[in-house]
Image: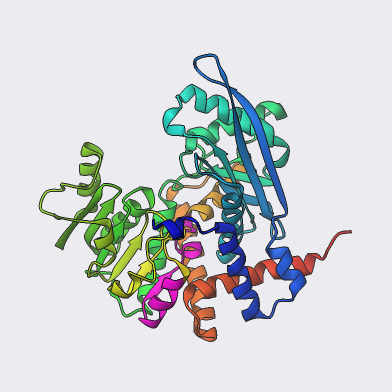
Amino acid sequence: MAGTESQINPFETAKQQVDIVADLIGLDGGLRDVLKHPKRELTVNFPVRMDDGTYRVYTGHRVQYNMARGPCKGGIRYHPQVTLDEVRALAAWMTWKCAVVNIPYGGAKGGVICDPKHMSKGELERMTRRYASEISAFIGPEMDIPAPDVYTDSQTMAWIMDTYSMQKGYSVPGVVTGKPISLGGSEGRGEATGRGCAYVIREASKHAGVHVKNGTVAVQGFGNAGSVAANILYDEQGAKIVAISDSKGGIYRADGMNPHAVEAHKAKTGSVVGFPGAKAISNEEILETKADILIPAALENQITAKNAGKIQAKIVAEAANGPTLPAADTVLYEKKITVLPDILANAGGVTVSYFEWAQDIQGFYWTLDEVNQRLERVMVRSYDAVHKVATERHVHNRTAAYVLAIQRVVDAVKLRGIYP
């Protein structure tokens, strides 16, 4: 990431996005202000006993951005660079993501400033439980439902669910999503982000002059979302995966690769690099690879004004959060490249989190086929709605997705009114 780009305040970007859409839909100043301010913010400082018997104080945040459409939903991340403005921005983006796929949630986000790579499992458990107890008055199945994010996982959610349940005196599986299946997690949650992305790519291909069957695909970032999307495009839609990368480098093969074999190679060696029969390419080169479909599934700020002109794909599907800078959107739109924005393309994860919560609330669980069929319906319907707005307003898909999402939140705010 370039130095100047890393200094961009994410919350300022989030507020600018609101202003762009507010201008388009003619939103008055008062409602703009509502949409540019989080509803509630909590910062907690709490001690944790370390393995050596000493105590360290950690700082954690939880931001609930907007609750007009329902309880808040959003992940918790553990990272040394967590800031309150980052958490505010992520909570805002979760609000729009839930609205664009029309699930009855507002947006939230949480984070603890820590370095989980240098903490033992015991230290992580004690920190998680203490953080959960500090925010417990502000979370719950009817108020705010956390989920995993960067450096948190199903085990983290199990600890939070147990801590919250111990305080209540009975099990409350619906307080978090992304739990282990044995504790009320949902079938299909692990692959939901990548699967949802694959469904949206399939729908977009019908309008972008791309045939997914035998079409070529490049995947930047072969983690959960990237690998699942590649596998589904390969297995179910007959696509040819020609380029794959991870944090250590990339591989390319013009006649295609079996993504399952690449996954096995990565599991064995720790990277996709060195996959037999493929040539080495860089993470920068993979973005500019000749392919019909490009899936940025790694980090933010990857597609910039500098490299957007070199992108050859006809569809860019953002499985990662924020991989495309605003200046690049204009370049891609002028090149008639179809961008499937993150708040649509990677919303499969939060959609199946919603399904998990709904199953927990009713104590009735669905099969994997039922989950996938419901996910497909939501993603197809959401893509169609975004495409319709983009066509009618002559804007690119990102602006269309924000118009759709923000209008839905505005409608809810207006209908509810201001209490008292």
Q: Position of residue 52 (x, y in %)?
A: 50, 15
On-image quarter of the C terminus: bottom right
Residue drawn at 47 percent across, 38 percent down: 153
Q: Nearer the viewer, residue 238 or 317?
A: 317
Q: Which residues are magenta?
A: 327-348
Residue drawn at 51 percent across, 28 percent down: 124
Residue 182 visible within the image: no
Residue 343 visible within the image: yes
Residue drawn at 67 percent across, 36 percent down: 44
Q: Position of residue 92 (x, y in %)?
A: 61, 58
Residue drawn at 83 percent across, 63 percent down: 418
Q: Position of residue 157 (x, y in %)?
A: 54, 36
Residue furthest out toward the front: 3
Residue 177 is drawn in which quadrant? top right
In this rendering, the answer to whether 403 lies above or below 91 is: below
Q: Nearer the viewer, residue 255 or 129?
A: 129
On-image quarter of the N terminus: bottom left
Indicate whether residue 342 is drawn in magenta.
Answer: yes
Q: Position of residue 62 (x, y in %)?
A: 64, 44
Residue furthest out toward the right: 420
Residue 414 is drawn in which quadrant? bottom right
In this rendering, the answer to whether 52 lies above or below 153 is: above
351 left or right, relative to 258: right
